[in-house]
Image (tube, rainbow, N blue to C red):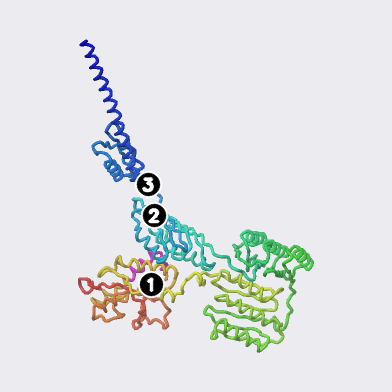
Amino acid sequence: MRLSSIAITLGTFAVAAGLCLVAAFFSVRLIEDSSVIGVRAELDREGLTWASVDANGLQLFVIGTAPNEAGRFKALSAAGRVVDTTRIIDEILVNDTSNAPPPRFSVEILRNDNGVQIIGLIPSATDRVRLIADITKLAGADAQVSDLLEIADYDNPEGWEAALRFSIAALRSLPRSKISVEADRVSVKAMTDSADARRRIEADLSRRVPEGLKLALDLSAPRPVISPFTTRFVITGNGARFDACSADTEETRRQILQAANAAGLQAKATCTIGLGVPTRRWGAAVEMGIKALAELGGESITFSNADVTLIARMGTAQADFDRVVGELDNALPDVFDLHAVLPKPPVETPEGPPEFTATLGPQGAIQLRGRLSSDISRTTIESYARARFGSEAVYTGARIDETLPGSWPVRVLAALEALSKLSNGSVTVTPETVSITGNTGNQNAGSEIASLLAEKLGEAEDFNIAVVYQEKLDASLGIPTPEECETQIVDIVGDRKITFEPGSATLDASAKDILDDLSELLQLCGDIPLEVQGHTDSQGRETMNQQLSQDRAQSVLDALRTRRVLTASYRARGYGEETPIADNGTEAGREANRRIEFHLIREETAPEPDGAGDTETEIDEGEEPPRDTVDEAPDANAEGTPDEQN
């Protein structure tokens, strides 16, 4: 009986112990699961997706590879907010970034009428606040600027700051654009207002691109309306060329240029793609005309809207002329009207062939010489020239010849109108042809002149065009004249000063912005004769002041040279204290007299006296330089000897 009771008691205790163990096991699992779930949720809320959690009893293991020590600390802190920190076992590794290469930093700036978006990854060393402020300033107060930049903890890569500054400058001129920026490359894709604006912006950006930075430009402009729609191809003994070329599509342009190359065109040529084509078969018609001209051996073919004029080379066999013209006339689309001419040798006269010549000088003066048909014609042509070129710029030396053809006045007026499209040059009118030569700042001048003469002279009239485009004459590029550069220097400097460390020729930090602004302008101005002048006040010895002013002028010249300004035609000149602009008896006056000025080097009006010295750096002692540009720094409050105060 007693043994039975003991067995029952032991069994009861065993069952109770088992139940306790089961309860404890499930309790621990419940605690483990709730802890893991809670810590995982907290880590997710903090964005620490790299971290994971595991549990073993009451111990909680935080596992993963943190990007840095700050990330590791953040993960442990998040776990400590859920469970007791004594239960947390740290098994986090920290990523070693000491040898990791920096990411590829890049920024994309999108600008349209609604505002600006800036997207990308920048180094932490970049002044993000200033970058956004600069973009906001150029976009305007009403524009919305969306800052979607990410930051990585790295220094700026080489060239990064220069690329950003250049991109902001480009954005200023392009209200509809996408600019992609990297440390060594900037890509610009934008829509401009016109073809002239596109060429001006392309030239400006190409000049300003920092050294070592690759620039990719993709600027587009609306297609111009071409009226009359003109193409003129010429083959002479000197080779083949286009005087004008118009196309309605890229495919048409390619078709025309391929035909021209097959006919002997060697030089690079372009066709303007525009609106106003008289037929979709324009390319095929021009191709036929060029082939026919090449088969005849040369001279010219002109397409002006639907009018086609073919002028064969003098001496072409009549049978060949008739055959080629007949084949071309039959092949051309019905919309075109062909007029073909085989020139006859000119009739010799005792006085020689009649001729009218107009010459346009670089300063705008025009001279009219040769023959005109009547007094009324001479008065009309002279009045037209005065209206076109200025009343004071016209000299007339033409005589009357009443035997001239009736179309002579029309030919002369058309020639003068064509001449007005040049910066300088000449035009010659004969009974057989109108020839124009000269220089222009308009890349499309040849095409415009060809269209004009084709329209004014009509069918069967021959003309020769030999005009040369010069970038320095192109007003659309915004290249200022030397005089305009001198004036703009004053405007850029304003009330600022180029400053130096007291008593020395070392530029101080505040001069950087002025010199950066000046270098942008002077790069645009190009190779102009400019003198950088240094001036001091009258404190100290005169010889010391002169040397200090010379050294300071040279420092400014050297600083411009390091900013890629072409300084071959510049010179530095120190004037010391000899040309004050204010009273040296007051501190304010002495401050004003310590300055740097920029002036054009102009030709001397009088011969240099014997023994006057180097003509490159000396001027007459009695001649006072102009003083309209004041931009040198005060050394006010400088301590030391009077010499040092300059």
Q: What separation in Å lies between label 3 and label 2 (alpha carbons)?
A: 20 Å
Amino acid marked by disc 3: Pro
Mark in the foreground, 3 or 2: 2
**Residue beneath the point at 62% across and 75% down:** 436
Q: How many numbered tags mark residues here? A: 3
Quick check: is 519 in the magenta stretch? no
Q: Residue 492 carries which label?
A: 1
Q: Name the residue under label 2.
A: 149
Tell me if residue 508 comes above or below residue 609 in the rendering. above
**Residue beneath the point at 42% across and 71% down:** 569
Mark in the foreground, 1 or 2: 2
Q: Which mark is residue 126?
A: none
Q: Position of residue 85 (x, y in %)?
A: 24, 39
Identify the element where label 3 is drawn. loop
Q: Give the range drawn in magenta.
A: 552-567
Q: Position of residue 451 (x, y in %)?
A: 64, 72
Amino acid marked by disc 2: Leu
Identify the element where label 1 is drawn. helix
- The quadrant holding residue 558 is bottom left
| Tag 1 and tag 2, C-beta contact below 8 Å | no
**Residue beneath the point at 67% across and 69% down:** 305
Q: Mark 3 points at which residue?
A: 101
- The quadrant holding residue 420 is bottom right
Q: Residue furthest bottom?
A: 375
Quick one: quadrant of the C terminus?
A: bottom left
Q: What separation in Å lies between label 1 and label 2 (alpha carbons)?
A: 33 Å
| Tag 3 and tag 1, C-beta contact below 8 Å | no
Give the class, few, some or many, for how many residues have Cα within 10 Å of label 2's Cα (few <14, many ≥20): some
